[in-house]
Image (spheres, grey):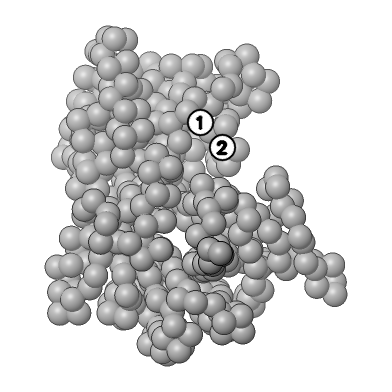
Amino acid sequence: MQNEEIKKEPRHVFLIGAKSVGQYGGYETFVDHLTACHENAEGLHYHVACKASGDGAMDESKLSGVSQEERDRKGNVVRFRYHNADVVKFSVPKIGPAVAVLYDRKAFAAAIRFAKQHGLESPVFYVMTCRIGPFIKGLKRKVRKVGGRFFLNPDGHEWKRSKWSAPVRAYWKRSEEQMVREADLVICDSRGIERYVQETYRKYLPETAFIAYGSDPEPSGIGNDDPAFREWMNKNGLRPKEYYLIVGRFVPENNFETMIREFMKTETPKKLAVITNGNERFRAELEEKLHFSKDPRIVFTGTLYEPALLKKVREEAYAYLHGHSVGGTNPSLLEALGSTKLNLLFDVEFNREVAEDAALYWSLDEGDLSSLIGRAEALTEEEREQYGEASVKRIREEYSWEKIAGEYEKVFLGTAADRER
């Protein structure tokens, strides 16, 4: 009689650092797509940490397919199943910017306890961003005690962001160094970030892997006569193909000053639609410098979080302006390449790495972007179509979620050596 096949336990992976699932930002979208792609994977089981309250907190009522909800004594959902992943919500006190550090540390410690209590075999603890460097050495010792591995995604150069004070930037840089030093594997979503890690922290001999962020190039499926789309367009005084578009956080390192100033120099009758969060202080600073409120073409629309509608707005833009200068593979850039035919990108390593020849590039030199917009205005529809086909091809071949999920599966299951580098 043949021996019965022994079914192996799945590899348990703890995702730490996102605020929610499918909401708010890049890591949240990443967690949503990764768990969806691996929902039926027998070899992997995900545990996801989320915030119970505060900025970007998890709201499971906005998800479809949630099951097995667990509630506390007050009736609040504290745990649920989504895409076959175990999602746990953590409450942290309101202590200002340090709340993110406390949240990551609490979620990491809870994941280690869970692995120990359930005797999990070789669990993976994947931490996104470098907030908890001062605590990582002690956490790493506990990871080793449960037979686990600590993987890190360092995100971009958070320590370069102008929104942070000098002491906070110094904390970010030191924290990054401490976490890279302790990581068993540093997963970088940009080859530029991977080179930076290898060169900057050479003395620690970091093991790194490049796995990009993903995107979905499929059309929105929304028509121009869709009520929600028409309402949004009318509210902002926009018409299809008659506006340039910017989508991103309203912060200096995304080069809003250059993009708005250079657009104001042009003679295009098209508008510039800016979809961003409300940073009133920064907006006041730019108004004092540029007086953009006097240009009726500049339209600040506020935020837009409904994915299909945002994709439709991207599709109907004449061109997309991308000014991000800090970080790795930017989600908003990938979304633009998959949806907007013509993309005008700030000429920095990270952006060229993603778009290659499927976009046009501009610098901070005075007159460079306004000149490029003039060139964009002169393009024929056939030329715009060619750029659009090239950018969608780029997304399908290198940045599809299926490809990205497959790369992560190999890494999480310990077959990194088999990956194409």
Compare residues 105 and 407 and report the one nearer the observer.
Answer: 407
Q: Quadrant of residue 128?
A: bottom left
Tag shown at residue 307: 2
Q: Residue at x 40, y 76 (%)?
A: 149
Give me the residue at 31% from left, 39% from top.
Answer: 398
Specify the quadrant of the image occupied by residue 271: top left
Q: Secondary structure at mark 1?
A: helix
Q: Position of residue 188 (x, y in %)?
A: 30, 59
Tell me the quadrant of the picture where the N terminus can be found. bottom right
In the displayed structure image, the side of residue 236 where residue 142 appears, left or right:
left
x, y percent for residue 231: 65, 23
Marks 2 and 1 in Cβ contact (< 8 Å): yes
Q: Label for residue 311?
A: 1
Residue 418 visible in the picture: yes
The image position of residue 168, as x and y in percent, is 37, 75
Type of amino acid under label 1: Lys
| Relative vertical location of residue 81 with respect to residue 138 in this rendering, above or below | above
